Each structure stands twice: as structure tokens, then as C-alpha cells.
Image: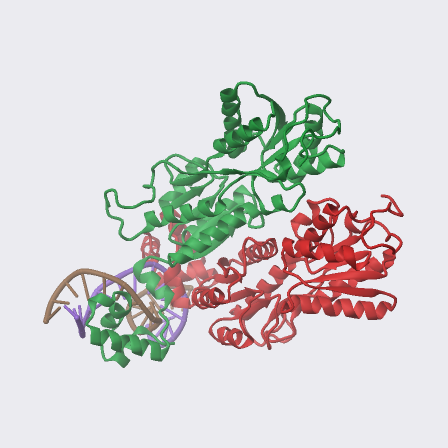
Chain colours: A green, B red, C purple, D brown
Amino acid sequence: MVTLRDVARAAGVSPATASRALAAPDMVAADRRSRVLRAARDLGYRPNRAARELSTGRTGMLCLVVPDLANPFFAAVAKAVHARARASGYAVLVGDSDEDLRTEAELVTQLAERGDGLILCSPRMSDADLRALDARAPVVLVNREADGLPAVVIDNADGTRQAVSHLHALGHRRIAYAGGPADSWSDVRRRNGLREAVAALGNVEVVDLGPFSRAFTGGTAAGDLVAASGATAVLAHNDLVALGILDRLQARGVHVPQDVSVVGYDDIPSATLVSPALTTVAVPLDRLGRAAVDLLLAQTAPGDSTDPGGGRAEAPGGAPVRVPVSLVVRASTDVAPAPRSAPTQTGPARTAR
Amino acid sequence: MVTLRDVARAAGVSPATASRALAAPDMVAADRRSRVLRAARDLGYRPNRAARELSTGRTGMLCLVVPDLANPFFAAVAKAVHARARASGYAVLVGDSDEDLRTEAELVTQLAERGDGLILCSPRMSDADLRALDARAPVVLVNREADGLPAVVIDNADGTRQAVSHLHALGHRRIAYAGGPADSWSDVRRRNGLREAVAALGNVEVVDLGPFSRAFTGGTAAGDLVAASGATAVLAHNDLVALGILDRLQARGVHVPQDVSVVGYDDIPSATLVSPALTTVAVPLDRLGRAAVDLLLAQTAPGDSTDPGGGRAEAPGGAPVRVPVSLVVRASTDVAPAPRSAPTQTGPARTAR
DNA sequence: TTGTAAGCGTTATCAA
DNA sequence: TTGATAACGCTTACAA
């Protein structure tokens, strides 16, 4: 193994100069610098990570913990985090908690001592535990808020607002909502947006179909209720539920969008793989991931001076970064509602595509 | 920060004894051991990773590089790798090459010096580059073979064999194949399986629809050719292509499976989100990932003695681990083929569901 | 600008 | 079984 001493010797300088020539080129005279650089190249010098870490206390790695890597939602965040981290010279240590609180707790404590900071995606941990963790290593929350911890969240309420507004514009006046689990942090917020939007509109009626599992099967169950609800449109907690509804409605001979319009949330890739393609509230997962990295690096950054008004990233403990969402209109809401009459009739659409 | 010296001092022993008490408990007297353990606990001692790494040369991390984390195929592998690595006390450094050769090359060299070994999933690098990398750090290939490097691959050919056999049993005698890119390592093997199966059966005819992009859109293009081919069944390179075919056929009024049966490959989650649900060759991604970790750890393992006939994992440089695949029959091949007549007719199915 | 030398926290070697 | 002590390879005061 080639060490810095070897390079220094070959270049005829001290190890300190060699170190500086590589890390802080401006601090060393041009001729010596080039000698060092060449020696390093010739010898195939690769700095020893562990030694550097031991000396500096920084690993150049950040940790990302998600509930499920195989979930397209979190996979997209992971991809974005990786890209942004890499662009800043960081490697990514990834943790999959398998949707389990205990696993999550173990994972974060293990990873905390391996990286320079943690990005926690939809963590289930308590606020207190999160704060305790933050004392060990800088933490950034994604899709979750806790006390004053830096966080980046989706503007959940605004998404439902947009969806309702879209449906209202199409003429829908009776809209069903197929919500997620009652204890879901995001569903509460999506419901709030729904309530506000409806209140603002005045002439819209909402049928709460009740909570459903956040999966395709949840949607299957919801589908039957939609058909019986007399609603001309349904807004689902997320795309998986919406896809389940779509499938169930079609199996029952209810045409989408002619008889019932369907709107999802998240815009997972599958939304475009079905017909009709799903209108949905697109969540910019890549922005979520990028913002999280920026927030973390802002805390971790060496130039951690007071920096008055300098950095563009949120100050630690500042207000959460709220990422905007946007409705993507596709075929599943392509037409105006049929006249409000029998719930499950399959009459001709008022407006054909 | 609490160091090992602090613990040693508190326990009234030397740092060396403290180190041993924690790492190799049997090497130290019971009384001292318990004193050290208690002191460590009381003081909240957390060993410094960097120092340990510097001293031992081992990081306790392994690196995983995939072409695309957001691809459900690779996401599943990543999840499995993570789970298996964690069970063995390893953390996972993840790299996403974004399907780009240059990025992949940079990534692997960067990661190689951070972990104890690399798992490369469907790498695009040349055999020579892979060998060169292996000289730096232990490498295990997934879904790729190169020289004598340890690898774990899918039994691609067998999957197509199973699919053809299934279709043949249903009565199909004219089968279309919508292949992937010509330079695809796996498509070549899937084609081989197809050829062999057809040769063995004797009375089956294959229509090669040509290469398609491995995406949904590739399937859309293939769909039209299927309809025109006069085939009663189509086998696609992968599920995405199959889904595209499904969508296109349905848009054209061709009923699946009554008019044409469709079979995919991979069994991505979306395969069950469409109707009819997709019959497909299921690839056990979790086994792929687990096997890869086992293979890597077998190389990395400290007890690297000759171990005659001991370990259950493949010897480095041994034959690639070949993971079996299995056909999952779903609705998209649920009926016997309609009588061979006009290519795109939408006549009634011979057998209803 | 450069060099010397003192760490960084562990593990491993070698006597005792 | 234990304890000094020397690595491990790099960074960084501090001096020159």
C-alpha cells in the first residue's frame, strides 16, 4: 500500500507538505505541488479513508433510513438522495427498517456512528427519541415533523385542494374520499386540505368512505363503497388505493372516467401503466431527497459560522421546508361527470373523449 | 467523547485489557471482564469506528452498485442485500450508476476504498475492468458473468422454457416473442431457452417480433406486431414490455387472454396491479441478493483458511450460483387459445372464465 | 511556505 | 492472563 509518506519521500518533501498539496493546493508552492501531484499519480496513491476519518472526525458519508426500499415512493427518495449526496462528494449508507419500529431504532443508532448525519424518511420513532438521536448526529426528517428538527415535508393539504378544485371544475359536486390509516401523519393533513377546499368551494359534498389500508387491496374494498356512494368522483389517499378502486370499479362494469372519476396521490410509476391512466397529485420525490441532503449538509458543513443571510438552505430548527405538489391530469378524470342519478348505472358518458 | 482509555481507567485495567474484554471476552479473567463491561456501560462507551478500521483494515461495510435504485427489480435486490448484510453485522453503502457506464466506473472505484467488498448488479463494465476492480477489493457479480469472478445469476433460459411449456400445454402452437435489446446479456439467454424449448416440443412455431426497448413503450410498439403476427400467445422480454403489450392489445379491442395470451418475465409488483393480472416468470430477487452477500462474505471472512469442504457458499472463482425461476400463472394466460384465424379479430373466446 | 511532531482511538505485538 | 507500547495513515498546530 502506498502511503502519504511514500509520496512525500518520492517528491522530496515532508508528509505535511504532501498532505497540503493534495488537500489545500493553494497553501503550497507551485513547483512542490506539481512534484507531489505527480508522485502521487505515479505511485498510484489512494488516501486511506480510515486514517483521514480518524484524524478529521468526518466520514464523508451520510445515512439514509427508509421504511421500505422496495416501495417506489422511498426508492425514488433514495435515488435522489444518492444523486445529491454524490454530487457533494458524499457516499450514502442506506438502512431499510422494514416498516418496523424496533428495527428502525436499532438501525439509526448503528448508522449514527458511521456517518456524518442522518436522513430519516417517514420515521416511526417518537419525537423524544428523534431528539435524542439528533444529539448524537445531525438529523434531517423527511415526510415527518418533530419539534424543532430540520425537516422537509410535502404540502399534503395543498395536493388535495388541487384535486378537489380540478374535480369541481369538471362539474363534480359529490366527491368520495378513500382515506388512509387514521394514524397516518400524511392522511390527517390530506384530509385537512380536503375539508378546507370543500369549505372554500361551498357547493361540494364529501362522502368519507372511511380509512383503508394503504395498499391495492385497500382500494379494492373502497371500490365497492365508491360505487354505492352516489359520488361521481373519488379521491384516494394514494395511488395504490386509487389503482385498487380503478380495478374494482372496472370489474363491476363502472366506467372510469365516464361514470366515476378517480384521483390518486403520489404519482408512482404504475399510475401510467393502467388504463385509464391515473390522474394524481404528483409528489416531487427527487426534490424531497435533494432538499433533505442540502439541509443535512448545511448542518454538517465545516464553514458552520454564523453566516448572516448567506446560505440558501433552511437554518437548523427553522421552519420545515415544504415541497409543493402538483396535480397531473390523466385519463381517469378526463370527462365531466354523468348526471347524478343511480350509483352504479353504466349509462353513456355525457361527453365522450 | 468516551474512549477506551476512559473505560480502562474507570475499570482499573490497561487499555489493552479493556479492548480484549469487549472484543474477545474469553481472553480475560471474569472479574476484570465484568468490571470493564460495567464501566463501558456506565460511561456510555461507543467504540470509534474510524480508529478500529484504521487498526484492523476492515470497515464492516459492503458496497452495492445498481443501475437504478428506482427500478423495482434492483430495489428488491437492494432490499435483500441490506437485510442479509445487516444480519451479518454489515452496513450497506449503496451506489446508483443511473444506467451510465462512466458513472458506474467512477462509483465503483470510489466505493471500493470505503467498504470491505463490492456487489455489482448488472454491471456494464468490461470483463477486464471488473477483474482490475477485483484486484482492489473482493467483487461479486449479480446478473452478469465475467471470467472467473464469483457471480450469482438467474436461470434465464429455464424461465422461458417454463413459459413456453405452459403455453404449449394450454394449446398454443404459434407463439410470438417480444425480446429486449439485442446486446442484453439476459435476453440472449432467454432467447436460448426459447429456442431449446421449441426444439424440444417440435410442434410449436415462434414469431420473433424483434428487439424492443425494455420499457412500457417498447411493449406498446410490440403490441401492434403481436396483433398482426397471427400468434395466439406472446412472451415478452420482461414485465414492463408485457404490460405495454397488454395495454396496447386492449386498446385495439384484442381480448387477453381470450384472443391472445401474454406472459412476462421478472414478476415486478405491477404485474398484479393490472387486469388481467400478468402471468410471468418470477425471479426471486431476494435470493439473488442474499446469495450475493453470502458469496462476498465468504471471500471477506477472516477465517479464510483452506476450510476443506466446510463452507456452504461457492468458492471464489467457482461456478456461478444459478438461482432458479418459476412461472406464476395468472389471468393473462387463463384460457386455451382461440382457433387460429384472422390476426386481430375480436371474436368470442372459446372458453370463458 | 515548509517541516516537525503530536495526536486521533483502536488493535496487535511482545514481554512479563 | 495482563500491560506497555508500537503501529495504523492522515491531519494540523506550532515553529521555523
Q: Position of residue A240 (x, y in %)?
A: 62, 40
Q: Position of residue A20 (x, y in %)?
A: 25, 68
Q: Return the residue nearer the eye: B196 or B108.
A: B196
Q: In the image, is residue A346 above or below residue B144?
A: above
Q: In the image, is residue A350 above or below residue B134?
A: above
Q: Is residue A178 visible?
A: yes
Q: Position of residue A211 (x, y in %)?
A: 61, 29
Quarter residue B207 falls in: bottom right
Residue at 42 percent of width and 50 percent of height: A112
Q: In the image, is residue A283 above or below residue B231?
A: above
- Looking at the rendering, in which quadrant would you find the N terminus of chain A? bottom left
**Horizontal side of residue A300 vs B151, given as left or right:** left
Q: Return the residue nearer the eye: A317 or B5.
A: A317
**Horizontal side of residue A306 vs B171, given as left or right:** left
Residue extending farthest to the top is A202
- Looking at the rendering, in which quadrant would you find the C terminus of chain A? top right
Quarter residue A274 falls in: top right
Q: Is residue B239 visible?
A: no
- Numbered label tally: 0
Q: In the image, is residue A301 above or below residue A223?
A: below
Q: Position of residue B16 (x, y in %)?
A: 37, 63
Q: Return the residue nearer the eye: A227 or B131.
A: A227
Residue at 85 percent of width and 43 percent of height: B353
